[in-house]
Image (cartoon, rainbow, N blue to C red):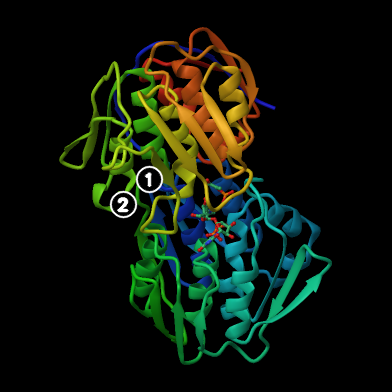
Amino acid sequence: MAAFEVIGGQPLKGEIVPQGAKNEALQILCAVLLTSEPVTISNIPDIRDVNKLIELLRDMGVKVGKLSTDTYRFQADDVHLDYLDSEQFAAQGRALRGSVMILGPMLSRFGRCQLPKPGGDKIGRRPLDTHFLGLEKLGGKLTLEGTDFYKISAENGLKGAYMLLDEASVTGTANIVMAAVLAQGTTTIYNAACEPYLQQLCKMLVRMGAKINGIGSNLLTIEGVEVLGGTEHRMLPDMIEIGSFIGLAAMTGSEITIKDCQIPELGLIPDTFRKLGIELEFRGDDIFVPAQDHYELATYLDGSILTISDHTWPGLTPDLLSVLLVVATQAKGTVLIHQKMFESRLFFVDKLIDMGAQIILCDPHRATVIGLDQRNKLRGITMTSPDIRAGVALLIAALSADGRSVIENVEQIDRGYQFIDKRLAALGAHIKRL
Ligand SMILES: CC(=O)N[C@H]1[C@@H](OP(=O)(O)OP(=O)(O)OC[C@H]2O[C@@H](n3ccc(=O)[nH]c3=O)[C@H](O)[C@@H]2O)O[C@H](CO)[C@@H](O)[C@@H]1O
Ligand SMILES: C=C(OP(=O)(O)O)C(=O)O
């Protein structure tokens, strides 16, 4: 297990370029399975989960050519269906959450797929029911082996259908869309997830020849086509990384410019940091965060305590709540952080409490943070990163803290943050990989 040693308390300064979006990359990479023609993808982040998915595709027979550090060319003109039955394929599928999105494209193009329960963060129950409800509506036949191995087939092809999803699952919607684009007839998906990465997927599919209406809304209408062709696609910057850098600047009292953010795609993220009292300036497409000695939490108009909670897009992404929580520990004021979607994502606050933060974990979903207003700094400690976003939140806490911290299990952070130690060291952070 790798670890980071951090000597905290140093203000950082400089410019940082966000990586390509992890969760967009996982959708887009799976979509290369939908065509036998070449697909060129740029701004691919060099992170563990994405590299694992690229390896999985290569082992399935997809031709993978690396054109530059962040650009690859894929061609799925000779997919080895037998590989799906191998132990190695199952092990690769188990290793990340994003692998689940090969189900939709494989089902629609080749009539079958199978997968064990995919990996990803252990942050509470992560049901796949919406994925299969949708794929079954299109004519997929699901066979369950035990409770954690799924086989799905459609010998006679898929047929378009109307469906009202029980929840607006992000990867579920991506899977269903990728199945519907090659189904016969019209599919209507109501209560579809509509976050920017899914919009990016839909736009790419349209460039490949798919017919999709309603992109960006929760009502998608898809007219199936017989074949899809190749295309080029560029990934958005990672909005969770951008939010993490805003939080880092605030907590460490640093002046940081985050470059090329595609600000219109960030939804509520900038305004949520502003509610924590953090000043942000948009300079063209860059976000400038000035060094701030203090920041003060907003209250509601009637003076009552603010709640920050997640919601499906265009609400606030759940993936930033851990960072927002950490930033609140040094604000002036009190805030309730309410993580509605996942039930085991707030337990990492124990470590922040050990560092001196004032937090009451009310229940698994809610934590009240009483900000220290920089009166006391957090103290460096040794801790383990439980999941990707808690990991980065703890890293931010460690960089702001007095003294030495060690963060273990940083493979969790490496899943989604590209060379984070080197990039933060370039801003002046004292961080070493052990
Ligand atoms: C690889 C990838 O892209 N992972 C992201 C994806 O995961 P993923 O697609 O797995 O997450 P889902 O959107 O399916 O659901 C997330 C959780 O929220 C619950 N839920 C979802 C929708 C809803 O209307 N009500 C509800 O309660 C689900 O039961 C689940 O526990 O989307 C999540 C939600 O933005 C993000 O945290 C993950 O980082
Ligand atoms: C939960 C996340 O990732 P995954 O879905 O891959 O576990 C995340 O990116 O915050």
Q: Nearer the viewer, residue 213 or 361?
A: 361
The residue lying toward the viewer, choosing from 116 and 226, is: 116
> Residue placed farthest to the front in the image?
302
Residue 291 seen in the figure: yes
Quadrant of the rendering where the C terminus is positioned: top right
User: Quadrant for ligand 1?
Assistant: bottom right
CA neighbours of label 2 inside 10 A, class few (<14), some (14 to 19), many (20+): some
Q: Position of residue 386 (x, y in %)?
A: 64, 35
Residue at the top extreme of this rendering? 403
Q: Amino acid at mark 1?
A: Met
Labelled disc at residue 64: none
- Which is more foreground, mark 2 or mark 1? 2
- Of 165 and 434, nearer the camera is 165
Vertical position of residue 356 compared to residue 303: above or below: above
Residue at 74 percent across and 73 percent down: it is 151
The tag earlier along the polypeptide, 2 or 1, is: 1
Q: CA distance from mark 2 to mark 1?
A: 9 Å
